[in-house]
Amino acid sequence: MKNDLYSAIRKWAVRNVNGTLAKQIRSDIDDAWANNNSKAKKRFEFLYRLGEFENLPNAVKSIDIEERTKSREMQSCWMCGTRHADSYRATCTTGEKRQHFIGRDCGQILAAYGLGSGVILSADEKAANLKQKQMQDDLENLVLNEGRPIPLLPTSGPVKETRSDFLGSNYAWLVNQELPGDVRRAVVELKDPYFKASRSELKLVMDYVANNRTFPTDLFKPVLDDLKKMEAEGLATGVAARLEEKMANGTMTPRDAEVILDGTDYRGYRIARNTVTLKNYGEPLAGLLNDVIPALTHDKPKWHDDHIRQMYVNNKVLNANDYRLAKTCLNRWTFGALESIEGGDKQRIRNIAVSLESIDGFKDKIEGLVVIQRKMQYAKDHTSTEEYAQIEKVRESILGLPEESRVKVFQDACNKAYELIKDPMRLLQSPAMTVEAFKDQYNTDVSRIIDVAGKVHAKGWLNDFKRKYVPHLKEHLAYGILRKEDAPRLVKAAEKMKGYVRA
């Protein structure tokens, strides 16, 4: 039944509101009272009494939507009084700043009355990001405080993959299992980007995976390799053989491995060895990651575009292998984050990495990150010089001339300039290694080879090596790197120079 309140709301709601929005508001108010829709009527009454606002759109705009949230505990909607598990946390920009909940359906309706769909989308995105951060924090705490690296075996997928996490890599398997009620509920809540799940739910799911999912046994080989190193140093006996025997079955659960490893401090051994590897390079791990994150951020959408087009375009900072390595490290050590690592997170990321990675795997990853860092510094230094900028200007000037004016000498200069411009970026795209890794692999001092080669007067291959390769080798070695294709040449040069110098 229509009454004075209805008339007052209808008149107030569209004051100085014109066009389609005014027509929509009147129609919705009429429908609410004509159908005696108590929920819709309460919504309009709430906005009418919210404050001294000229009209309904202004009242709506005074509501500050903060984030979307889901929980098992039902929350009463601030606007209509209905209880919801899916709500928006909100305050009013005037008056008391106490937080309230607005049911998701009321929040969506507000968008039509002037709140703006962007506000709702922003609140949804904020909630999803907070949930992802919560999952990362919970995973980190379980790894660091409870020492649970084995259930975190899955590694990153193809280059195009942008995010990898524990639940995501196991989700397809979990939803196809006959799960206990508490585990199934935990899976649903953990996967929902808006649900406020707890660490105990994540642990419940992790333990279920560890106890019940069988993985190919080659995923346990890094653990086996570490155990063999321990036994070679007399720090364990017979454990590697028992694990290897179990692995012969082809598949096993993480819990099978944990039972065999019970009482063997392979994690402590791994952490100690990996810490030494990190110290050998003298680089803080967070610093390495922060140096490569800008390149990953730049390349990520370009790999996505390549995947859509099914065509590779040479427009990335990192080559495919370097990108995959850096993304894998971020996926495993920060559980998919792609933000700068600051403050207390620096030590936490380091502790996760040295705990999670096998000894050989960690050494390969750290060397790869150092290579990327040094190649990027080389490119940065060589492309930021005044000479580099001038080369580009000369090249553009020559190319801007009419074709008949480009005499051969200028055309050759243009081609040479182009080669010089490409060189710093070419190194970024080339497979490379650190000088430390070269010395470790070949037991040969690179600096010594280059120094002697510069002093030896020889014909044939050594003369070609000195003329064609030593100049760029010196430049690269100044940054502690060399192209992998140069490594065999250095080894060959060292062997040939034995006839010219004393050992």
Image (cartoon, grey):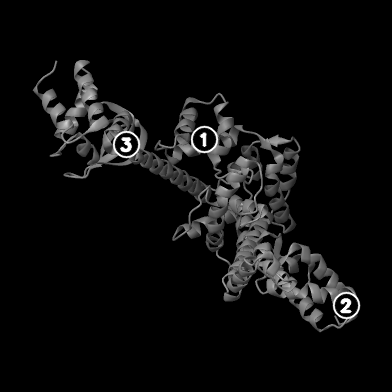
Q: For the residue marked with disc 3, what is the amino acid?
A: Tyr
Foreground residue among 256 and 384? 384
Q: For the residue marked with disc 2, what is the amino acid?
A: Lys
- SS class, disc 3: strand
Residue at x 80% of width, y 73% of height: 468
- SS class, disc 1: helix
| Residue denoted by label 2 | 498
Q: Please, is residue 323 above or below residue 399 in the view? A: above
Foreground residue among 288 and 18? 18
**Between disc 3 and disc 2, whose residue precedes?**
3
Q: For the residue marked with disc 1, what is the amino acid?
A: Val
343 with respect to 259 (left or right): left
**Between disc 1 and disc 3, whose residue precedes?**
3
**Between disc 2 and disc 1, whose residue precedes?**
1
Q: Position of residue 427 (x, y in %)?
A: 68, 64
Using the numbered discs, state the Cα–Cα distance from disc 2 to disc 1 in whole angstroms: 62 Å
Residue at x 71% of width, y 69% of height: 411
Q: Mark on residue 205? A: 1
- Tell me the quadrant of the picture where the C terminus can be found: bottom right
| Residue denoted by label 3 | 88
Direction left: furthest residue: 4
